Structures are given as C-alpha cells and as structure tokens.
Image: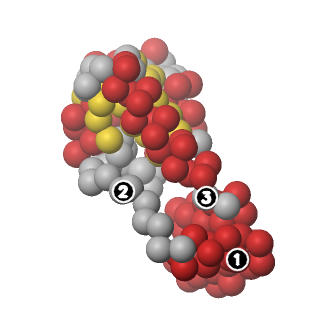
Amino acid sequence: MIAAVNGMACGGAFYLLGEVDVIIATEAATFFDPHVTYGMAAAFEPLQMTGRLPFGELARMTLLGASERMSAQRAHQVGLVSELATDVDDLRERAGWVARQISDAPALAVQGSLRALWAGRDMGRGQALALGYAFVGLGNSPQALAEGQERFASGARLEWKLR
C-alpha cells in the first residue's frame, strides 16, 4: 500500500501510516500525534511507528502531542517518508509511478516479498529468517519465474530512475 500525504497526518491518519508500505509526501505535509495533548494515552499510533521512526523521534512526537509537528523534510531525513514531492500533481505522479512498477511485477512475488518485509519488522531477526523459505515458496510460482526468465533473456531493460 502506498500513502500519498499532502497536508496533516495526525491521530488516526498517523495510525494508518503504520500500516502502509511506502509513504510519499509533499513538502507541505506535516506529521504529529495529538493524543497526549488532549488527555488520551497514545498507544496504537506509536506502536505502529516503532521500526519506522527512530525511538527518540517517536517519543518526542508522542509526548509533545499537538505542540509540535514533524515537517515532511524531517520525516524524509529520518526515513518515515521515502520521497518528497513538490506539489499535489507531483505527488500523484510519483505515487502513481511507484504503484505501476509494483503492479507490473508478478503478484505472488510482491506478496511473498511484502510478507517477508513485515515479518522482519514485526519479529526478531532469527524468527523472520526461519520463515524465509516459506516466503520464497509463497512468492515463487513456476509461471512468475518463467515470465521473469523470459523478460531477462529478451534483453529488454527497464527504464529505471535514480532517486
């Protein structure tokens, strides 16, 4: 899942960002969690963000609540946002490009890879590695492998971009 953020991402929207795979934002986007400011414990939002944000950044955002917002530039610096867009049109173009590249890949390969990524985030390293062959088995179908080999053997090269 790809999130394209323009404007504020706070509270429940901030929670949803913990569920996505790639976050792209405009330079105008901001991120914060207002729960503590309004007398509520912030639990699910920061729990979703562990592994996505350095602990000090996450603690600061959680405890300062609505008193401070993280800029898109800072979110990019600390790895929450993978790419910055200049405006909404640029955001749509960048998010659409990422979505098209992923959708062009064999679905089972994408699914197996995503499951491995999320397991690596949610489990200990050893536990996740122990499931590696299960994810490979899930994501490698004979049809997808043949398609990939055919694509490679054809000599056709992808037009890649540098980020």
* Residue 159: percent from left, percent from top: 38, 56
Dot 3 or dot 1, earlier in sequence:
3
Q: Is residue 110 above or below residue 57?
A: below
Mark 1 vs 2, N-terminal side: 1
Q: Which residue is mark 3?
A: 105
Q: Which residue is mark 1?
A: 146
What residue is at 22 percent from the left and 34 percent from the top? 73
Horizontally, residue 33 falls left or right of residue 12, namely left
Residue 150 percent location from the top left of the image: 62, 75
Mark 2, Cα crowd under 10 Å, few <14 / some 14-19 / many 20+, is few
**Picture layout, residue 49 above or below residue 68:** below
Q: Which residue is mark 2?
A: 160
Q: Mark 1 belongs to which amino acid?
A: Ala
The residue carrying pointer 3 sits among few (fewer than 14), some (14 to 19) or many (20 or more) residues within 10 Å by Cα, namely few
Disc 1 from disc 2: Cα separation: 22 Å
Give x and y (percent) for residue 131: 68, 79
Instruction: Tell me which corner region of the image, top left, top right, bottom left or bottom right, holds residue 117.
Output: bottom right
Residue 25 shows in the view: yes
